[in-house]
Image (cartoon, rainbow, N blue to C red):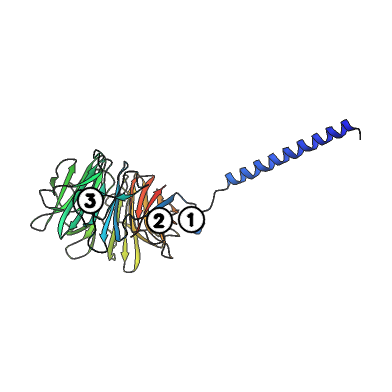
């Protein structure tokens, strides 16, 4: 073959090989992009992931967490032993992405029993030396120091929830032992009256807006109780949950009226949901990968369930409407005990010794 024809043939062959290689790479890329990755438990596609960090406290049990619709989150618990230099109160001003021990002007060694955050304000309810403690912080604090604040004039706060910009709703124990509904928007607490009469011993409160909140606890006879307000605390209604419930661990309502309640029926998981306000709660089967459920939190029309897998590791599921997706929380080797969603796309959860940032 003449040299010129040989060179032309070689160029043609090289061009063909390059074209085939490019086509092959494009086909591989198209296949990779077109096939959804199967991750999470049992191959269920993940709706989000959890990035965690150890608790800022080496000797404490975390038990409460709250995130507002802004950048503030707070988590608290009890020390294993006395002598703690600060309250067992963790604080984040990065929507739960990074946590640190809270700076506090008072309350050294306190146990924090409840935390609640709005967009620009957080409060923490606790006990120190058998005396009630109420701490607060706002985004206007240049030192980021939690300060001891006055209790409501009606009594001592035992449960609190916050939402919106800076509104907090609470239940206060009066000097006679009864409960009073109180509310604060930056300033002092005002009494609303109309206490949730079926609730004798409140344990926790969750607010998805300044008007819609749930309160969890027990009745005077020790029966598990869930109360719901849709009027900012001026009126309350009793949720019709299963009569076989032995304990209620958490409750939260979406802004469209759907409510979730989680707890236990003996040793079994209790998971129920109502489709409309003031309607009975119906049983929901936990999605594959979520063996037990310890808490629930809603924001907008999204609700997140937190608990453990069948093997005892941390697990969580997000419900977008009626469909559920398992979240990747592989960082948590132990069960998630509590969860709080500041927005429909960002939540934070806690184990006894770690904090997990959930991005949906």
**Neighbours of disc 3 within 10 Å: few (<14), some (14-19), many (20+):** many
Q: Is residue 38 left or right of residue 207?
A: right
Q: Is residue 349 left or right of residue 223?
A: right
Please give the residue where the numbered disc 2 appears in the rendered image. Answer: 316
Q: Is residue 45 left or right of residue 54?
A: right
Please give the residue where the numbered disc 3 appears in the rendered image. Answer: 124
**Neighbours of disc 2 within 10 Å: few (<14), some (14-19), many (20+):** many
Q: Position of residue 75 (x, y in %)?
A: 29, 52
Asked whether 313 or 107 is in front, the reply is: 107
Name the secondary structure under disc 1.
loop
The image quadrant of residue 225 is bottom left
Q: Earlier in the sequence, mark 2 or mark 3?
A: 3
Q: Position of residue 49 (x, y in %)?
A: 44, 50
Taking the spot 62% from the left edge, 46% from the top edge, the residue there is: 31
Label at residue 22: none
**How many labels were placed on the picture?**
3
Q: Disc 2 versus disc 3: distance between alpha carbons?
A: 25 Å
Q: Position of residue 93 (x, y in %)?
A: 32, 44
Q: Earlier in the sequence, mark 1 or mark 2?
A: 1
Q: Disc 1 versus disc 2: distance between alpha carbons?
A: 10 Å
Name the secondary structure under disc 2.
strand
The image quadrant of residue 226 is bottom left
Name the secondary structure under disc 3.
strand
Please give the residue where the numbered disc 1 appears in the rendered image. Answer: 40
């Amino acid at each position: 073959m003449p040299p010129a024809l040989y060179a032309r043939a070689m160029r043609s062959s090289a061009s063909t090989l390059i074209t085939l290689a490019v086509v092959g790479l494009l086909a591989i890329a198209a296949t990779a992009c077109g096939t959804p990755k199967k991750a999470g438990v049992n191959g269920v596609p993940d709706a989000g992931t959890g990035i965690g960090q150890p608790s800022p406290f080496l000797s404490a049990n975390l038990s409460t967490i709250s995130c507002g619709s802004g950048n503030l989150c707070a988590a608290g618990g009890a020390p294993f032993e006395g002598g703690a230099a600060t309250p067992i109160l963790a604080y984040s001003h990065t929507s739960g992405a990074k946590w640190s021990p809270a700076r506090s002007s008072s309350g050294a060694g306190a146990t924090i029993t409840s935390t609640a955050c709005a967009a620009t304000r957080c409060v923490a309810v606790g006990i120190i030396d058998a005396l009630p403690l109420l701490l607060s912080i706002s985004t206007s604090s240049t030192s980021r120091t939690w300060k001891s604040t006055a209790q409501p004039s009606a009594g001592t706060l035992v449960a609190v929830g916050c939402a919106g910009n800076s509104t907090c709703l609470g239940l206060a124990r009066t000097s006679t032992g009864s409960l009073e509904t109180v509310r604060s928007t930056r300033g002092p607490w005002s009494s609303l009256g109309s206490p949730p009469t079926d609730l004798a011993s409140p344990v926790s409160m969750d607010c998805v807006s300044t008007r819609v909140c749930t309160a969890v606890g027990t009745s005077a006879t020790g029966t598990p109780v869930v109360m719901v307000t849709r009027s900012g605390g001026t009126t309350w209604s009793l949720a019709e949950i299963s009569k076989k419930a032995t304990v209620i661990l958490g409750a939260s309502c979406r802004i469209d009226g759907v409510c979730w309640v989680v707890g236990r029926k003996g040793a079994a998981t209790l998971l129920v949901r109502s489709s409309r306000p003031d309607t009975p709660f119906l049983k929901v089967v936990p999605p594959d990968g979520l063996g037990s459920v310890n808490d629930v939190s809603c924001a907008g029309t999204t609700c997140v369930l937190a608990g453990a897998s069948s093997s005892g590791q941390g697990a969580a599921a997000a419900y977008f409407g009626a469909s559920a997706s398992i979240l990747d929380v592989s960082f948590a080797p132990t069960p998630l005990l509590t969860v709080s969603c500041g927005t429909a796309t960002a939540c934070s959860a806690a184990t006894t010794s770690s904090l997990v940032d959930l991005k949906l």
